[in-house]
Image: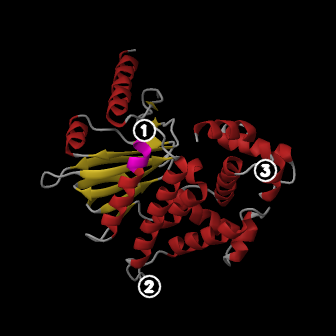
């Protein structure tokens, strides 16, 4: 009983600290004694988008009360201008000096320590749900799937990213903030990050992991055919390999099967169409390869936790 009371007190303390520091609601699931080997709590966010600055004072508060390993129900993008982070992600820890970009996808266990360096710490924190920029968010997986952290060249891309983040923050802070403007700025930010990574990528002719190449190729094929009713074997054949091997690669890279990735891409597009068009549920389902409305609704509800019509009403009320 004492262990349970101790855990309740600890959980409430962590939940309160994170809400106070970041303005994010979280709920830590209780686990039985003996199941805490890889304890991780869940961060939730009601908004579709959030942006704020993290500075020296925030880093000092965090150092006094460190945040445990956790997972998000949203995407997190960090633009580090000054300072340093110690980042535990993908089951390894890495120290990264600014300027840097770090992307943490939904559902991935990680732990961040924001550190001041030479008395400075200046980080843009951008939080958003996939629904906000469905198609673009999916592209981030291709950019960061093999490494969550990316170094930036001084006074080049970092300066431009800072400018875009400042513009987003200014719009976000307005009483009459326009979500369409924020969305376009976020898409621009992600496009700049992808462009910078491509232009500064070293020659991996000898060291490039074959699995990473295959996964990127799979994402390209998926982008062309996700709206079609295609099997796992179809994607495997396109990549000249067996379904088993393709599934193994996807599991190793993102811990999801080919079928799950295809469903995720379909779901993101379905959400995008529900919010941005007036197409009927049947039309959207058919466009994404579902011949029956009932089956499309069943799959959508299973993945999203609500029906397509309820999702449309909720998102349109928020935007």
Residue tagged by mark 2? 205
- Write the residue at 46% across / 27% down: 30
Q: Nearer the viewer, residue 297 or 252?
A: 297
Marks 2,3: beta carbons within 8 A: no
Q: Which residues are magenta?
A: 169-174
How many neighbours does mark 1 have within 10 angstroms: few (below 14), some (14-19), or many (20 or more)? Answer: some
Furthest-right residue in this view? 292
In the image, taking residue 205 as reference, residue 115 lies left or right, namely left
**Numbered disc 1: secondary structure:** loop
**Numbered disc 3: secondary structure:** loop
Q: Is residue 138 visible?
A: yes
In the image, taking residue 77 as reference, residue 184 lies left or right, namely right
Residue tagged by mark 3? 279
Labels 3 and 1: the sequence-earlier one? 1
Quarter of the image with the N terminus in it:
top left
Residue 242 position by quadrant = bottom right
- Write the residue at 43% across / 48% down: 171
**Rendering colour mode:** secondary structure
Q: Residue 34 in the image: x percent, y percent?
A: 42, 31
How many neighbours does mark 2 have within 10 angstroms: few (below 14), some (14-19), or many (20 or more)? Answer: few
Labels 2 and 3: the sequence-earlier one? 2
- Say above or below: 14 vs 95: above
Residue tagged by mark 1? 40
Q: Is residue 35 magenta?
A: no
Q: Residue 163 in the image: x percent, y percent?
A: 34, 60
- Say above or below: 118 vs 12: below
Query: Which of the labelled discs sits on residue 108, or is there none?
Result: none
Q: Nearer the viewer, residue 69 or 85?
A: 85
């Amino acid at each position: 009983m004492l262990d349970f009371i101790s855990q309740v007190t600890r959980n409430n303390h962590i939940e309160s600290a994170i809400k106070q520091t970041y303005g994010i609601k979280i709920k830590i699931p209780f686990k039985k004694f003996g199941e805490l080997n890889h304890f991780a709590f869940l961060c939730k966010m009601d908004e579709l988008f959030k942006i704020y600055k993290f500075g020296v004072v925030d880093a000092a508060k965090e150092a006094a009360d460190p945040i445990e390993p956790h997972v998000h129900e949203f995407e997190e993008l960090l633009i580090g201008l000054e300072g340093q982070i110690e980042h535990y992600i993908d089951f390894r820890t890495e120290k990264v000096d600014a300027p840097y970009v770090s992307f943490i996808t939904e559902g991935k266990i990680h732990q961040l320590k924001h550190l001041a360096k030479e008395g400075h710490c200046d980080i843009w924190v951008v939080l958003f749900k996939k629904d906000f920029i469905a198609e673009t968010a999916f592209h981030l997986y291709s950019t960061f799937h093999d490494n969550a952290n990316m170094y930036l060249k001084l006074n080049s891309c970092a300066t431009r990213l800072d400018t875009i983040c400042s513009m987003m923050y200014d719009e976000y802070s307005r009483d009459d903030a326009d979500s369409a403007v924020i969305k376009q700025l976020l898409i621009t930010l992600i496009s700049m990050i992808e462009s910078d990574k491509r232009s500064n990528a070293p020659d991996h002719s000898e060291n490039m992991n074959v699995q990473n190449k295959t996964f990127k190729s799979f994402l390209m094929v998926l982008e062309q055919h996700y709206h079609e009713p295609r099997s796992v074997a179809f994607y495997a054949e396109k990549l000249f390999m067996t379904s088993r091997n393709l599934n193994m690669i996807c599991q190793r890279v993102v811990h999801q099967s080919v079928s799950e990735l295809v469903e995720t891409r379909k779901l993101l597009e379905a959400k995008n169409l529900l919010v941005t068009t007036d197409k009927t549920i049947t039309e959207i389902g058919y466009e994404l390869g579902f011949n029956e409305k009932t089956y499309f609704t069943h799959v959508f509800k299973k993945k999203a936790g609500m029906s397509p019509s309820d999702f449309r009403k909720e998102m349109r009320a928020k935007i």
